[in-house]
Amino acid sequence: MAEVIAIDGGYKLNGTVRISGAKNATVALIPAAVLSDGPVEILGVPEISDVAALATLLRELKCDVEIDGERIKVDPTHMEDIPLVSDAVNKLRASYYFMGALLGKYKRVKIKMPGGCYLGPRPIDLHLKGFEALGAKITYEDDTYLLEAEELVGNSIYLDFASVGATINIMLAAVHAQGKTVIENAAKEPEIIDVANLLTKMGAKIRGVGTDTITIDGVDHLSGTFHEIIPDRIEAGTFLIIAAAAGEKVIVQNIIPQHLEALISKLKEMGIKMDVVGDSIVVYGRDDALKPVNVKTQIYPGFATDLQQPLTTLLTQAQGDSHVKETIYIERFKHCPQLNKMGAHIDLEEAASVIHGPTPLHGTRVEATDLRCGAALVIAGLIAEGRTEITNVYHIDRGYDNIDHKLITLGAHITRYHIDE
Ligand code: EPZ
């Protein structure tokens, strides 16, 4: 039996939705907590399955973990240097953050290859190069990495690509390295700043985060602290798109608008009316025809690749052709055949799609192939004629905190049930 999310489309949405803590910060903050000598309390934790998977890994390391609602307490006091080779490791991509954290803490780590959504090739060569530059010797056998270092010594590391994961992972290893580490061409995503803020509260010495040059002066001890996670800009972006597609008046609350400038300007270019009011954005339903736009995904602060798939669904309703160019994950187009099953008319090109609009969508059974594809299909289901059934909902639950419950409070008709596979 497979669980599906079923959506009866065509209902106008109204009301307020509160955005949860950022998934892509949370999944780095939790491994970072093991670098501390004492308990770390993190607030604003989203209720997503990635958090449960990380808690499993922490418990494998003999960490005390308490999760209650939006609060997680990680106490590494009785932690042990244990290899992370269980299947829980390849449940998510971010398990690779234990590489940097455990290398930083124990100067050695044995860990399985991380998992995560298939979006095309996702190597971790930049992470490994960074660890080697700090003095780690790396061997790979049976799908498992062993990283060992006599000493971790600060170094200058130039990233060939401003990778989010590599920037954070090298930072986690360098906070305990001797001397100064400089990461050049570092990524600038807000989630990286959030991790550096936690580490700094623990006693780390980090400068320049949020710019393309980060400097870390190694310290011997990091102590327990308390941290509140930033709001999830990708969940916020998804709900802004949902409001534009199916809303009359929707208030998306607990947002940092600066984090969404690229999306906001695209939605305005399409003709969507919205007001930014403090940490909320009010989105007014589309009354006029939506204009087609061209989008090119880029590293932050450019247009986020994680919003490319959700926006594609809205572009199916625009009056004309829109072009989407993907520069981060060249194969991130598995949502397009699923949307075409619902009546969209999307052509694929090399690392790009052409969305011919407007096309009325109709409900049918579709497959979430990854997290953001799942979001694109939820949006399609909200505007489609009839019922849409989305399979592989585990992809959606990995990164969206109670999305169906939040949509029901806005007036959507959504249920979950099981179907024969
Ligand atoms: C993070 O992935 C996010 N995941 C992704 O969100 C997001 O799409 C991505 O950053 C870009 O913003 C998490 O934070 C857990 P990268 P990450 O390293 O760190 C290549 C979602 O939907 N690369 O910045 O893995 C890589 O193949 C997920 O929430 C190398 O070649 O992204 C990709 O093409 C999906 N070698 C590009 O760089 C490396 O060592 C960007 O990757 C590392 C990356």
Image (cartoon, grey):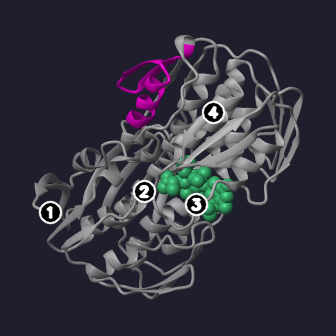
| Magenta range | 51-76
Residue 306 to residue 208: above or below = below
Q: Is residue 61 magenta?
A: yes
Q: Position of residue 340 (x, y in %)?
A: 32, 82
Q: Position of residue 337 (x, y in %)?
A: 35, 79
The nearer-to-camera label among 4 and 2 is 4
Marks 1 and 4, Cα distance to the nearest angstrom?
40 Å
Marks 4 and 2, Cα distance to the nearest angstrom?
36 Å
Residue 383 to residue 214: above or below = below
Marks 1 and 3, Cα distance to the nearest angstrom?
30 Å
Q: Residues within 10 Å of mark 3 (few under 14, many from 20)?
A: few
Amino acid, disc 3: Arg
Asked if the residue at tag 2 contacts the one at tag 3, i.e. Cβ–Cβ closer than 8 Å, the answer is no
* Mark drawn on residue 110: none
Amino acid, disc 1: Glu
Q: Is residue 46 visible?
A: no
Helix, strand or loop at label 4? It is: strand
Marks 3 and 4, Cα distance to the nearest angstrom?
21 Å
Quick one: quadrant of the N terminus? bottom left
Asked if the residue at tag 4 contacts the one at tag 1, i.e. Cβ–Cβ closer than 8 Å, the answer is no
Q: Would you say the beta carbon of the disc 2 residue lies within 8 angstroms of ligand 1?
A: no
Q: Name the residue that disc number 2 marks.
A: 238
The nearer-to-camera label among 1 and 2 is 1
Q: Would you say the beta carbon of the disc 3 residue lies within 8 angstroms of ligand 1?
A: yes
Q: Name the residue that disc number 3 marks.
A: 122
14 or 158: which is nearer to us?
158
Q: Name the residue that disc number 1 marks.
A: 421
Q: Name the residue that disc number 4 marks.
A: 109
